Amino acid sequence: MNTHGLDYANDINEEVIMAFAKDLLKAVQNVIDTEPTAYDPDKVVEQLERRYRRMRVVLNMKRKTER
C-alpha cells in the first residue's frame, strides 16, 4: 500500500487508518444495498408500456391527418 508519511494523533499508523476507512465504506455500501427501492419496478415498466402505447396511437393519428 502507498503511504503518504502522514503523522496521526495517538501514534496510529496510516495502514490502520486506511483499513478503518475501507471497512467503513463497506459498511455504508451494505446499508445502501440492503435498502428497498422507493418504487415498484414492475409498476414502472407497466407505466412505461402504457405511455408507449398511448404515444404510438397519437403518432398514428397524426400521420393519418397529415395525408
Image: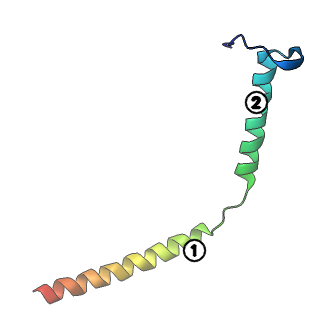
Q: Secondary structure at mark 2?
A: helix
> Where is the N terminus found, in terms of image quarters?
top right
Left or right of 51? Residue 36 is: right
Residue 23 percent across, percent down from the top left = 78, 32
Give coordinates of residue 30: x percent, y percent. 75, 45
Q: Of the residues shown, which amino acid type is indicated by label 1?
A: Lys
Residue at the spot 70% in from the left edge and 50% down from the top edge: 33
Crowd around label 1: few <14 · some 14–19 · many ≥20 (10 Å): few
Badge number at residue 43: 1
Q: Quadrant of residue 64?
A: bottom left
Secondary structure under the numbered disc 1 in the rendered image = helix
The tag on residue 21 is: 2
What label does residue 58 carry, if any?
Answer: none
Rendered position, 15 above or below 55: above
Quadrant location of the C terminus in the rendered image: bottom left
Q: Where is residue 54, by image quadrant?
A: bottom left
Q: Nearer the viewer, residue 45 or 65?
A: 65
Q: Earlier in the sequence, mark 2 or mark 1?
A: 2
Question: How busy is the neighbourhood of tag 2: few (under 14 within 10 Å), some, or many (20 plus)?
Answer: few
Choose between 30 and 9: the one closer to the eye: 9
Q: Is residue 10 left or right of residue 50?
A: right
Q: Residue 28 at x, y = what percent?
A: 75, 43
Closest to the observer, 22 or 66: 22
Mark 2 touches mark 1? (CB < 8 Å): no
Q: Residue at x 73, y 14 (%)?
A: 6
Left or right side of 53 for 43? right
